[in-house]
Amino acid sequence: MKKLLLILPLVFLLCFAFGCQKTEEVAEEPVVDVEADVEAIRAEVRARSNAAVAAEEAFDWETAVTFFAPDVVVQPANAPQIQGREAQLELYQTFPKMIEF
């Protein structure tokens, strides 16, 4: 019994000593600047929007349709629904005929 009473504190001391050892450094997670990311996305959207408007104002229909998804769906007023860039291009090409200068 005396041996057990002598060994038991040593076991606890060893467990405590090994538990307090310094472990490997864990790399910190990278800091994400959400505000900067949001502003970068907004700037990109503004730039693309401005480029799309500029292409439409210049009647550059081939460039204008590139800003649409390949499977674009458009519902023009008082007209049937159209799907796809080619159909959008055909619609764009009718605009000058509709506008009287």
Image (cartoon, grey):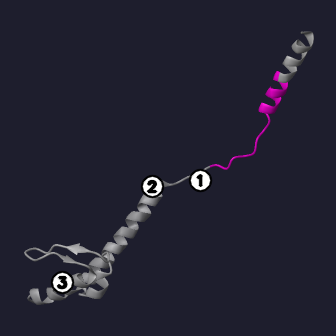
Q: Which residue lies furthest to the front in this view?
A: 1
Provide the secondary structure element on which disc 2 rests. Answer: helix
Q: Where is residue 71 in the image (x, y as percent from the top left)?
A: 29, 75
State the quadrant of the N terminus: top right
Q: Residue tagged by mark 1?
A: 30
Tell me where residue 18 sits by quadrant: top right
Q: Which residue lies furthest to the right in this view?
A: 3
Q: Position of residue 14 (x, y in %)?
A: 84, 27
State the quadrant of the C terminus: bottom left
Q: Earlier in the sequence, mark 3 or mark 1?
A: 1
User: What amino acid is labelled 2 in the image?
Assistant: Glu
Provide the secondary structure element on which disc 3 rests. Answer: helix
Residue 91 bears which disc, if any? 3
In space, the residues marked 3 and 1 are separated at their CA atoms by 48 Å
Residue 13 among those drawn in magenta? yes
In space, the residues marked 2 and 3 are separated at their CA atoms by 39 Å
Q: Residue at (46%, 60%) from the top-left corner? A: 37
Q: Position of residue 9 (x, y in %)?
A: 85, 18
Q: Residue tagged by mark 2?
A: 35
Q: Which of marks 2 and 3 is nearer the N terminus?
A: 2
Does residue 10 lie above or below 49 as drawn? above
Residue 29 among those drawn in magenta? no
